[in-house]
Amino acid sequence: MRIFLSGPSGVGKSTIIREILKKNQDIVLSVSYTTRPPRRGETEGKDYFFVSRETFETMIRDNAFLEWAHVHDHLYGTSLAWLESQEHQGRHILFDIDVQGVRQAQEQETPGWFIFIIPPTLEELSNRLNKRGTEDEQTLNTRLNNARQELMAWERYNYLVVNDTIEQAIHDIQSIIDACRCSRQEAIGRLPWLQKIA
Amino acid sequence: MRIFLSGPSGVGKSTIIREILKKNQDIVLSVSYTTRPPRRGETEGKDYFFVSRETFETMIRDNAFLEWAHVHDHLYGTSLAWLESQEHQGRHILFDIDVQGVRQAQEQETPGWFIFIIPPTLEELSNRLNKRGTEDEQTLNTRLNNARQELMAWERYNYLVVNDTIEQAIHDIQSIIDACRCSRQEAIGRLPWLQKIA
């Protein structure tokens, strides 16, 4: 099962992902391929798969990616082979993915559940970004404009989860995951007798 | 929001419905119209709306029903006007409905969530029906055959919930309801600012 999680910067996505991974031992976070060099403390195969630009471009030509993107001069992508190997081992995959990535995944008609984490209001998102206090006004405005752009894509998602309180947001996403486990598409695989009924 | 719950006789549907209604004060059970005379203890408007056959047939001609059925010489049906009046008051509706009713509702392209409660296996369903001890073997066989027939309709449902333990089944259905509240179709109504974003 593939669960795609998006949300604008500052909405609390990282905290939610950490909690969801703690609660669901059979769910792993998608590990991307990237041409960016590793930063201190990053581990190959855990944070990213680090590859050369040449290798990455060969993978693009071979349609080896579910989605890929250009970000700040570097390439990032989700390998279909990696995905399938994880699923073969009985794991479900959680994607921390932006609107562009979701668009690409949907163009490939990926089976999956698309969840959009949204702030209670745009003002509240602005407050949260302000509270971080680490950015100048221009950076803040850029982030808010990007957020507004991203939020316009809400129709692409199956679920809209408002992060008003983090506890409620985690509860809602956990409910969505538990419901997805009961979806006909997922559940029927565990019910061979029902498939064969006649 | 309309939640349609089906499941073969003996699968534990009544217990599940009772618990779900307790936990969700904004969900009401659908009240049907019927031509059957009231039984002792049944209340008009709570258990059923009791009407004459003439009234019922007029309602059929007026397309006043979401679905209706003939059961043991009596007519039963769900009134669209009743549904809409409940929804207007902010209530969600839970339907205790059989496969035939689901078929009719789907032919009318009702927006809704369709949940099928199934036994862990057919043998287990047989055991549960046996334990009731109130029926002769022929009645039991009829019930099992009916169950097998109904279970063949699993592809009509969005969700398949296995009632292995009642606690797990209630948890799963509650998760589905909570997820449905977060579905784009439901959630966007609570987010006027997001609808207008540009």
Image (spheres, coloured by chain):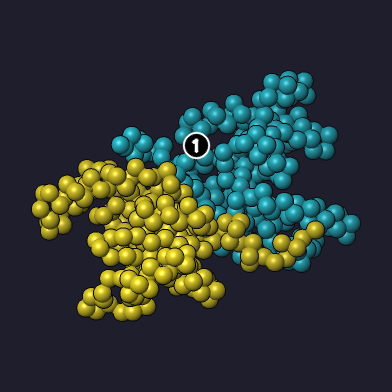
Chain colours: A cyan, B yellow
Write down the residue under mark 1.
A91
Q: Say which residue appears at 53% left-offset and 32% top-offset.
A: A86
Left or right relative to B134: residue A86: right
Indicate the chain on which mark 1 is placed.
A
Disc 1 packing (10 Å; few <14; some 14–19; many ≥20): some
Q: Say which residue appears at 44% left-offset and 65% top-offset.
A: B61
Q: Provide residue A72's location: percent of width, then percent of height.
A: 83, 38
Left or right relative to A129: residue B181: left
Viewer-proximal residue, B15 or A142?
B15
Q: Say which residue appears at 21% left-offset and 78% top-offset.
A: B40
Q: Give above or below for B61 relative to A71.
A: below
Residue furthest out toward the left = B136
Residue A182 seen in this snapshot: no
Q: Quadrant of residue B57?
A: bottom left
- Number of numbered discs visible in the structure rendering: 1
Of the 4 image quadrants, the one containing the C terminus of chain B is bottom right
Q: Say which residue appears at 61% left-offset and 44% top-offset.
A: A4
Left or right relative to A145: residue B90: left
Q: Provide residue A81's location: percent of width, then percent of height.
A: 59, 26
Question: Element type at marker 1?
Answer: loop
Viewer-proximal residue, B72 or A44?
B72
Residue B42 seen in this snapshot: yes
Q: Provide residue A164's location: percent of width, then percent of height.
A: 63, 65
Viewer-proximal residue, B90 or B25?
B90
Amino acid type, label 1: Arg
Q: In which quarter of the image is residue B13?
A: bottom left
Q: Provide residue B72's location: percent of width, then percent of height.
A: 24, 61
